[in-house]
Amino acid sequence: MSQKISRTFLLCGIWSACCCLFLIGLSSTTVSAAEKVLKAGAAKSNITHPLGEYIVGGFKPFPAENVHDELHARCLVLDNGETKIAIVICDNLGITVDVFQAAREFIKAETDLPPENILMAATHTHSATRASSPKYHDFLARRIADCVRCAMENREPARIGWGGVDEPSEVFNRRWYTTNPDFCKNPFGGVDQVRMNPPRGNAALVKPAGPIDPEISFISVQTINGRPLALLANYSLHYVGGVKKGEISSDYFGIFSEKIGPLLGAQPDDPPFVGMLSNGTSGDINNINFRNPGKRMGPYEKMNQVAELVGKRVAEACQKVKYQTWVPLGAASAELTLKVRKPDAQMQAYFKKVLARPEDAPQYHRYERNYAGRVQKLLEGPDEITVMLQALKIGDLSIAAIPFETFCEIGLELKEKSPFEDAFTIELANGYNGYLPTPAQHKLGGYETWMGTNRVERDASDKIVSVILDLMQQLKSHP
């Protein structure tokens, strides 16, 4: 493992040739205690991709034919007079690091917000595209940067508070032990111990293979006189779905973002209130209770129900929040190099046989040809990838950022071990690199662990947790 930690520093006290005191995540500007003022600004920009771009939430992408609801980038900027940080949440399946980096270059050239102090993430709606085409790649980077610039322009004196509330009714672990080995066949010719998304209400289901995280974490920002300015929430729910084929939608993430303002009593001011919902550690979590057969629902019905419930729970919890007119802010980041998984000779030989058969020949697994292509791509690709990990500090709250579809256990571990009083994780942040199971979950198999779904070494999650906890400790040690 190799890592390179980058930080922003504040020089405090008297400069000397011998000794300097550096604080992570702070700029070189200081103010007296009496002058300390927290400012906040929020904005959103439309990032809807053109019709005809492929919606890529499943194994067979199909072109977008209609827009059910527009996609947005939503930004919150915090500025305490010493440090500026920003969080940007984008309605997208997953955004690669090059798009985020292009946005950072715009922001660096056009603002005084340090680009390393910005957390950017995708929501993981399955009713949108990735930034795969050059045209949309450039458009998305530009619109993300515009959103940040508008949020910077909208800064005004503010107060901030945060908290959390449990809502376990909408989150279920989707990986199950089962007594039916046919359910657990994999595309590599073997049988796993667990199955992702097994048949609902089936007698062969034994128990889920992992936990859930029921907490909805949130940050509430108001103007000094109490007018709602912005709210950022975080929930470990993969997505909800239930859309019409070919329609673009932000899923429940976008619906929540529009519903939370009225629930908080926000008025149509200028600048308007901005709601935001980020994806927590939901790589193995969805909205389906596999114990029960379930009932058929209309398009968009379930996602509206979930968004409304989550919004009401957050609005209720906001009534108990204690607001502060100034808090310390910080940002720290690290680059971690991970090995890429590669097929061994036996796997290569197996897929060679798979591809040699006629396409209409009987299959061991319906996605075996898909994974033949994915595995070959890994074989021909780089041996290592370097990912950006990040932690933000807002008072005694820390936010971790991981560029993977991250298993719930990882987020729970970070909450438990964080040196901060409160913590949560935003996944698919600062890049997209596939799934991130734990080593124990790798041993069980299942879709999220398959080579091609997961791309990096099996102990990658342990290394990532270690780096993020180190970043958090650095932020904690430098108030």
Image (cartoon, rainbow, N blue to C red):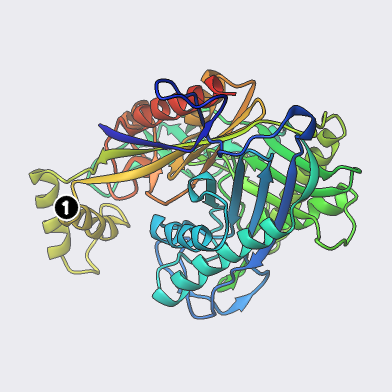
Total labels: the figure holds 1
> Which one is nearer the viewer's eye here, 98 or 248?
98
| Residue 151 vertical placement versus 21 (above, below) | below
Q: Is residue 296 visible?
A: no
- The image shows residue 2, relative to residue 239, as above or below, that is above
Q: Amino acid at mark 1?
A: Leu
Query: Please, what secondary structure does the residue beneath circle 1 have?
Result: helix
Q: Which residue is mark 1?
A: 379
Q: Is residue 234 left or right of residue 457?
A: right
State the image coordinates of residue 445 (x, y, percent, origin top left).
33, 36
Which of 450 and 339 lies nearest the eye of the viewer?
A: 339
| Residue with the most extreme front position | 17
Residue 190 visible, this orientation:
yes
Picture quarter with the N terminus: top left
Across and down, in percent, residue 321 comes to 82, 30
Q: Residue 243's spot in the image, x, y percent? A: 62, 64
Left or right of 362 in this view: 210 = right
Q: Is residue 159 above or below residue 266?
A: above
Percent from the top left, x then y, of residue 349? 9, 51
Q: Residue at x 50, y 62 (%)?
A: 109
Looking at the image, is 206 positioned above or below residue 292? above
Nearer to me, 277 or 186: 277
Q: Is 142 displayed left or right of 343 in the figure?
A: right
Label 1 crowding class (10 Å Cα cut-off): few <14, some 14-19, many 20+?
Answer: some
Instruction: Give the quarter of the figure containing the C terminus.
Output: top right
Q: Residue at x 57, y 40 (%)?
A: 280
Splitting the image into 4 quarters, where does residue 30 fall? Answer: top right
Looking at the picture, tell me which residue is in the foreground, 392 or 260: 392
